[in-house]
Image (cartoon, helix red, strand yellow):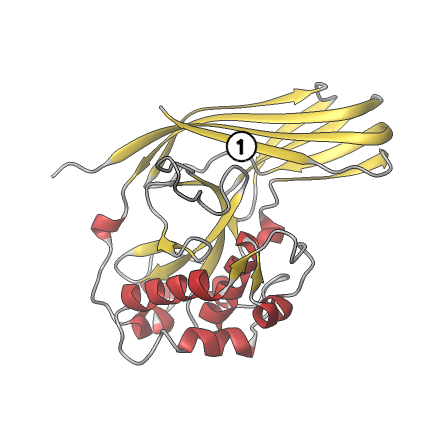
Amino acid sequence: MSTETVGYRVVHETRYSYENPVSSGRHLAHLTPRETPWQRVTAHAIELRPGATEESWETDYFGNRVLRFTHESAHRELVVQAHSTVEVTRQRDGWDDEIPWERASATSDFLTDEPALAEYRLASPYVPLLPAARDYARKSFRPRRPFLTALLEMTVRIREEFVYDPLATTISTPIAEVAAKRRGVCQDFAHFMLSGLRGLGLPARYMSGYILNERAPGAPGVQGADTSHAWLAVHCPGSGWIGTDPTNGKLADLEFISLAWGRDFSDVTPLRGVLLGAGTHVPSVAVRITRS
């Protein structure tokens, strides 16, 4: 049986317009798709306007490709445009539908090919181990339930019980507030679910990337599309990392393009920097995904 593969072209543009001229800027970008067992990068380039004074590439602690660049000449606008072509292969054919979730919670790092599962069980800057999140997770992760069944149920519950509201939160909003108001955006829902899963001892990591916004005429769009998207992945013995998207209530597979992963948003910010000058500035972000 052949394995299904889909090709995508992605253009991700971030534009900063500054109130005052910027005399110096130093930036870091997580805008390069990852090479993984289910994703192949066939082409990638990042265009900077104005061109950078210095550029350097590195691989961070989590294995993500990072571009660092510096501007030392005055400018009032910065445009960062990433062009990527990737192929994504279906993952679900290799997932174990019957393994009880307690196996994932109890498995030692030494019994897997993943050397750093322990750090994905711990609290991180944006993901405290919130008792309310753990209790929420327990309603789905009942004793001896199959891992995939429990994971999908919790994913769908968040989609049905939380409201997608871009005005409800900022990146600094604590997940305790997200849990209380049950409103937010994709990174909020991912952080909340990460807290609940880690509270049960499950290794779970934050995923940054894109989701295809393809729909029939008149149908509602995919939430979190047309910009950077966030979901999470949980490690299950025998299956590896399984992606799941609480914003849209489904497991992450062919429609998801992976940029970077880490403990939470702070590890994989698509673009951040330090400026001299600028004054007020608000970035505009646009993402276009087409099948190749």
**In this orientation, which residue lies closer to the viewer: 187 or 264?**
187
Could you say which quadrant of the image residue 60 lies in? Answer: top right
Could you say which quadrant of the image residue 251 lies in? Answer: bottom left
**In this orientation, which residue lies closer to the viewer: 74 or 151?**
151
> Looking at the picture, how far across and down is residue 63, in whole percent?
50, 44
**In this orientation, which residue lies closer to the viewer: 68 or 192?**
192
Identify the residue at image location x=58%, y=46%.
Answer: 268
> Looking at the picture, how far across and down is residue 44, in whole percent?
48, 25
**In this orientation, which residue lies closer to the viewer: 201 or 187?**
187
Task: Tell me if residue 165 can be seen.
Answer: yes
Could you say which quadrant of the image residue 104 lies in? Answer: bottom left
Local SS, label 1: strand
Q: Is residue 197 left or right of residue 168?
A: left
Say if 9 sits above or below 247 in the image. Answer: above
Residue reaching furthest to the left:
1
Q: Which residue is mark 1?
A: 287
Task: Tell me if residue 259 can be seen.
Answer: no
Say if 170 sits above or below 213 in the image. Answer: below
Q: Is residue 275 left or right of residue 214?
A: right
> Looking at the picture, how far across and down is residue 212, in whole percent?
41, 38
In the rendered image, the quadrant that contains the N terminus is top left
Identify the residue at image location x=30%, y=32%.
Answer: 6
In the rendered image, the quadrant that contains the C terminus is top left
Identify the residue at image location x=75%, y=34%.
Answer: 26
Q: Amino acid at mark 1?
A: Val
Residue reaching furthest to the front:
218
> Looking at the picture, how far across and down is residue 277, in whole percent?
88, 34
Q: Is residue 275 left or right of residue 30?
A: right
